[in-house]
Image (cartoon, grey):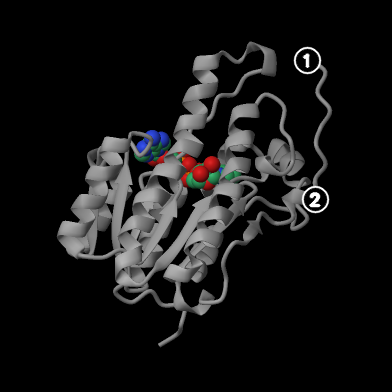
């Protein structure tokens, strides 16, 4: 069996109803993982999650509706994971919140919401995951960032700042808990789309957009999930405290000057 397999690893995915979350859930399940997926929206609103539930029983794919920026809800999620599976081997944290507005127009409430949904959720999920992994000998954490943490983007200051905060948070988790067998890394996407989204953009707009990528195209969620699967697998046993761009070279694209 390939070391990329995730046989019987219990992996918790946040934002599982989203594009990257649901594609990863499917890939990890197909590679033998037990997936606990969580989202703020109910599973009934996701036809992809309903079809995963149909294919894999609740001992393989278990959904918990929760807001992972709320400490009580996060505590409840992890106590359910402990009760049902007894351990946690991996975390793939995707849930986030944006506030797209010019810098001076962004209100404090909007800033706080985006920081809470993106950075505070990472703190909470990582904190309770680490607490659960320590007694069982460790595990792997992958926190999803964005190239917007590296290339400043106008009208997106809270998101970019929160994602940059995830880089440091992840390194501190790796530093403090390497001795407990815990690895923590960051996945940095540029942009990924479904085929429908690509078609929906129209050829001309898509062509202009995709010039920003060294590889000449936006990514597919599966290409991100592959890196997450590697980082969560035993094949990455010596990989920690690291940032991984999976962005087709988008990070080479310079920031655009914005004057209002
Ligand atoms: N899509 C892209 O092109 C892109 C680019 C760069 C980075 N990213 C990052 O990749 C990750 C996944 O992106 P995606 O495109 O799959 O996003 P998405 O919007 O499709 O999915 C995000 C999911 O998170 C859930 N969510 C939001 N707040 C939550 C909360 N507080 N508690 C629980 N669930 C919550 C949403 O309901 C949604 O299902 C994100 O961290 C995003 O910042 C995405």
Residue highlighted by disc 2: 252
Q: In this view, does 168 lie above or below 89?
A: above
Q: Residues within 10 Å of mark 2 (few under 14, many from 20)?
A: some
Mark 1 beta carbon near ligand 1 (under 8 Å): no
Horizontal side, residue 255 vs residue 100: left or right = right
Observer able to see residue 57:
no
Residue occupying image coordinates x 57% and y 71%: 239
Q: What element carries label 2?
A: helix
Q: What element carries label 1?
A: loop
Q: How far apart are marks 1 and 2 (CA)?
A: 24 Å
The picture places residue 64, in percent across and down from the top left corner, at 24, 46
Residue highlighted by disc 1: 260
The picture places residue 181, in percent across and down from the top left corner, at 44, 71
Quadrant of the image containing the N terminus = bottom left
**Dot 1 or dot 2, earlier in sequence:** 2
Observer able to see residue 133:
yes
The picture places residue 20, in percent across and down from the top left corner, at 46, 51
Quadrant of the image containing the C terminus = top right
Horizontal side, residue 183 vs residue 26: left or right = right
Residue occupying image coordinates x 26% and y 65%: 87
* Pick the front one: 14 or 73: 73
* Pick the front one: 260 or 159: 159
Q: In this view, does 235 lie above or below 207?
A: below
* Pick the front one: 149 or 190: 149
Q: How crowded is mark 1: few (under 14 residues within 10 Å), some or many (20 or more)?
A: few
Q: Which disc, if any, is residue 29? A: none
């Amino acid at each position: 069996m390939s070391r990329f397999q995730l046989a019987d690893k219990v992996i918790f995915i946040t934002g599982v109803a989203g594009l990257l979350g649901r594609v990863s859930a499917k890939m990890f399940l197909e590679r033998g993982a037990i997936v606990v997926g969580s989202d703020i929206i109910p599973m009934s609103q996701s036809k992809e999650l309903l079809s995963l539930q149909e294919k894999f029983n609740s001992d393989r794919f278990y959904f918990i509706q929760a807001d992972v920026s709320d400490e009580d809800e996060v505590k409840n999620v992890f106590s359910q994971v402990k009760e049902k599976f007894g351990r946690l081997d991996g975390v793939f944290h995707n849930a986030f919140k944006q506030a797209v507005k010019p810098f001076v127009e962004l209100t404090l409430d909007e800033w706080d919401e985006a920081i809470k949904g993106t950075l505070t959720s990472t703190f909470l999920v990582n904190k309770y995951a680490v607490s659960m992994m320590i007694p069982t000998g460790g595990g792997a954490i992958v926190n999803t960032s964005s190239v917007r943490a590296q290339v400043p983007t106008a009208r997106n200051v809270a998101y970019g700042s929160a994602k940059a905060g995830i880089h440091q948070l992840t390194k501190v988790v790796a530093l403090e808990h390497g001795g407990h067998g815990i690895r923590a890394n960051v996945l940095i996407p540029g942009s990924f789309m479904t085929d429908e989204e690509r078609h929906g953009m129209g050829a001309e707009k898509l062509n202009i957009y995709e010039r920003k990528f060294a590889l000449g195209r936006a990514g597919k969620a599966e290409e991100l999930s592959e890196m997450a699967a590697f980082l969560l697998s035993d094949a990455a046993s010596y990989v920690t405290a690291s940032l991984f761009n999976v962005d087709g070279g988008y990070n080479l694209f310079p920031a655009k000057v914005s004057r209002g």
